[in-house]
Amino acid sequence: MSAIALVTGANRGIGKEVCRQLAGRGLLVLLTARDLAKAQAACQEIASDNVIAKELDVTDGSSMQALRDEIEAQYERLDVLVNNAAIHYDHWQTALGADFNIVSAAIDTNLYGPWRMIKTFAPLLKKSDSPRIVNVSSGSGSLSTMGAGPPAYNVSKTALNALTRMLAAEMAADGVLVNAICPGWVATEMGGEGGRPIPDGAAGIVWAATLPDDGPTGGFFRDQQPLEW
């Protein structure tokens, strides 16, 4: 059976392109979105028998559990989890003036979402011969270069990087490679005009999702090159 990958927030932009590239490498890809109709439309655009639409809300534990049960019943395992879903690049805010409703929503999706996903799907990942977890992060979360910027987004991505380090250490004994990937500034709906092409941003995520067994874990990368935390 082909390796099985699950990509969150994949109905558009980087997530959809990651699905396209993984399918092109022969993986069976579960393209997920909160709105099943949008996931199905994205699958039609990709036009690959290797991509299947699934409904998933990373802020809803019951939604995650339902999908996990479905995957377990049908495939018995999961090989790749790409935590791509993210919201609120809140460039209009400052840290001092932040609306905590926006901050809380960003953390719920951008940090707790991946955290919930990994906890929920860890039993299926541990059944894989080559399990991989990719947390789609951002250079905005790097403390080494951080200054003023979108506060909710930056804090959520910094925390996601910390989670990546902890989980890489905890899951090493099970052979799970866990890495954080910055796709760079990409011309998506969130990134806006002027960024790099979406396929270029997705390529680093696909690299981390398909690492060999002796590949790195607990790292932070852009274009396969390490970034400072």
Image: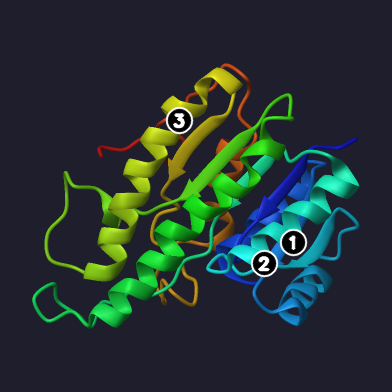
Residue 66 image label:
1
Query: In the rendered image, which quarter contains the C terminus?
Result: top left
- Disc 2 to disc 3: CB gap under 8 Å: no
Q: Disc 3 or disc 1, which is closer to the eye? A: 1
User: Secondary structure beneath disc 1?
Assistant: helix
Q: Residue at x 45, y 27 (%)?
A: 170
Where on the picture, by quarter, is residue 153? bottom left
Q: Identify residue type, mark 2.
A: Ser
Q: Which residue is mark 3?
A: 168
Q: Which residue is mark 2?
A: 63
Q: Position of residue 71 (x, y in %)?
A: 81, 50
* Cα gap from disc 2 to disc 3, whole angstroms: 25 Å
Q: Position of residue 140 (x, y in %)?
A: 28, 57
Q: Identify residue type, mark 3.
A: Ala
Q: Residue at x 43, y 72 (%)?
A: 87
- The disc, 2 or 3, on the residue closer to the chain's N-terminal end is 2
Q: Residue at x 55, y 37 (%)?
A: 208
Res. 220 visible in picture: no
Q: Identify residue type, mark 1.
A: Ala
Side of 144 relative to 43 (left or right): left
User: Secondary structure beneath disc 3?
Assistant: helix
Q: Position of residue 8 (x, y in %)?
A: 61, 60
- Disc 1 to disc 2: CB gap under 8 Å: yes
- In the rendered image of this protein, does residue 23 appear above or below residue 94? above
54, 187: nearer the viewer: 54
